[in-house]
Amino acid sequence: MTTALIAALITFLFTALLTIAGVGAAFILIPVFIALGIDIHVAMAVALLLNSIAMSFASYSYVKAKLVLWKLAIPILIVATALSPLGAYVSQGLNDHMLKWLFVGFLLFAGIMMLFYEPKERDIETSRSKQLAYGTSIGAVAGFLGGLLGVGGGNIIIPVLVWMGINPKKASATTAFIVIFSSFSGFLGHATLGIIDIKLLGLTAVASALGAVLGAWLMTVKLERKQVKLIIGIVLLAIAGKMVWGLLVK
């Protein structure tokens, strides 16, 4: 019970923060759960399901606030889902260590750009053809690279959307919607490899939902555009730092 309560508290804190960035907390929760003595497959399955739960609650708030760019999100989701298995297949013949270092470089570049680069905001919402073209292109890149590197596509999608000049709040909300489905797909893959701890899942699910509601409220009501962009940049750098640590300690 103590382990589940600690996991729930950590889940609440990180979910609230990372919901603002729209990337989900699984990348942090998985190693934390493993450190608490939870089986790796159970940790992965639960953390990915928590991603879906959190982003579902967050997306409800984002949809009400009209922040989700549907005509951009749907093609990204469809194409990314289709190309992710191809990326995973190609990765079998490549050096995994080198690929992850390249992705660390991308995250560092993306994080620094988020912190210091101010793109000119563009309104692409009025052009259906532009949204379809952008969505298809971003989905292809995010799906293939996500499968190739074994990482969440949201880490790739959100900086690209902001670079394109999309308002960071809308970029975060749109990415959060996509993460619901990509994370649930990953959960189904891992759930068959371990027995889910119902007590752990129940407590962390409640914590995840509450954290997502708090994070979504902060993002939509309390934070300004520049503050959201700053948080996204810090999150990307944190992901890069975690990946560097994992690569160096192996």
Image (spheres, rainbow, N blue to C red):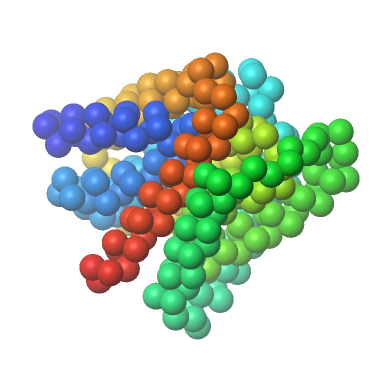
Residue 5, horizontal then vertical, whole percent: 18, 29
Q: Is residue 38 shown to the viewer in this render?
A: yes
Residue shown at 32% from the left, 29% from the top: 12
Position of residue 133 relative to residue 123, above or below, is below
Residue 173, horizontal then vertical, whole percent: 60, 33
Q: Quadrant of the C terminus?
A: bottom left
Residue shown at 54% from the left, 73% from the top: 89
Q: Quadrant of the N terminus?
A: top left
Position of residue 199 relative to residue 84, above or below, is above
**Is 174 in front, or is 223?**
223
Task: Describe residue 219's horizontal placement relative to residue 126 as left or right.
Answer: left
Q: Looking at the rendering, which quadrant does residue 200 occupy?
A: top left
Q: How many marks?
A: 0
Q: Which residue of the protein is positioned furthest toward the bottom in this rendering?
A: 93
Task: Describe residue 71's horizontal placement relative to residue 230 as left or right.
Answer: right
**Is 56 in front, or is 131?**
131
Q: Which residue of the protein is positioned furthest toward the left in this rendering?
A: 2
Residue shown at 88% from the left, 39% from the top: 127
**Is 141 in front, or is 158?**
158
Q: Is residue 82 shown to the viewer in this render?
A: no
Q: Looking at the rendering, which quadrant does residue 165 occupy?
A: top right
Position of residue 47 relative to residue 101, above or below, is above
Position of residue 137 relative to residue 175, above or below, is below
Residue 249, horizontal then vertical, whole percent: 23, 68
**Is 162 in front, or is 201?**
162
Q: Which residue of the protein is positioned furthest toward the front in this rendering?
A: 116
Q: Looking at the rendering, which quadrant does residue 140 occupy?
A: bottom right
Residue shown at 69% from the left, 44% from the top: 119
Residue 247, horizontal then vertical, whole percent: 32, 68
